[in-house]
Amino acid sequence: MDELIATGAGDVYHAGEDCWALRAGLASGETQDHTLHEVHRFASAALAEAAGYRACGICLDSHGP
């Protein structure tokens, strides 16, 4: 797996920028003129979880990539 990503506003990390849940959240924020938060990148799930994030149920569920 490549690096994992999360935004500063969320509590979930994703398998990559192609996750539709991540893209939908970013698009929704742009549409509503919200300030977009920094994207954080992690080399492992352990590092993302240590930073307070949990796995995305869409792109990182037990049946996902």
Image: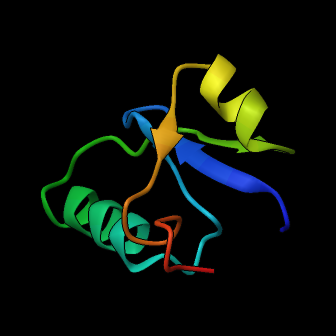
Out of 3 and 31, give the one closest to the viewer.
3
Quarter of the view holding residue 29: bottom left
Eyeballing the image, is 65 above or below 42? below
Q: Is residue 53 left or right of residue 24?
A: right
Residue at 62% x, 28% y is: 49
Q: Position of residue 2 (x, y in %)?
A: 85, 66
> Quadrant where the C terminus lies?
bottom right
Query: Farthest residue toward the front?
Result: 62
Q: Position of residue 18 (x, y in %)?
A: 56, 81
Eyeballing the image, is 38 above or below 31? above
Quarter of the view holding residue 40: top right
> Quadrant where the N terminus lies?
bottom right
Q: Position of residue 23 (x, y in %)?
A: 40, 72
Query: Farthest residue toward the left?
Result: 32
Q: Position of residue 37 (x, y in %)?
A: 46, 39
Q: Is residue 36 left or right of residue 29?
A: right
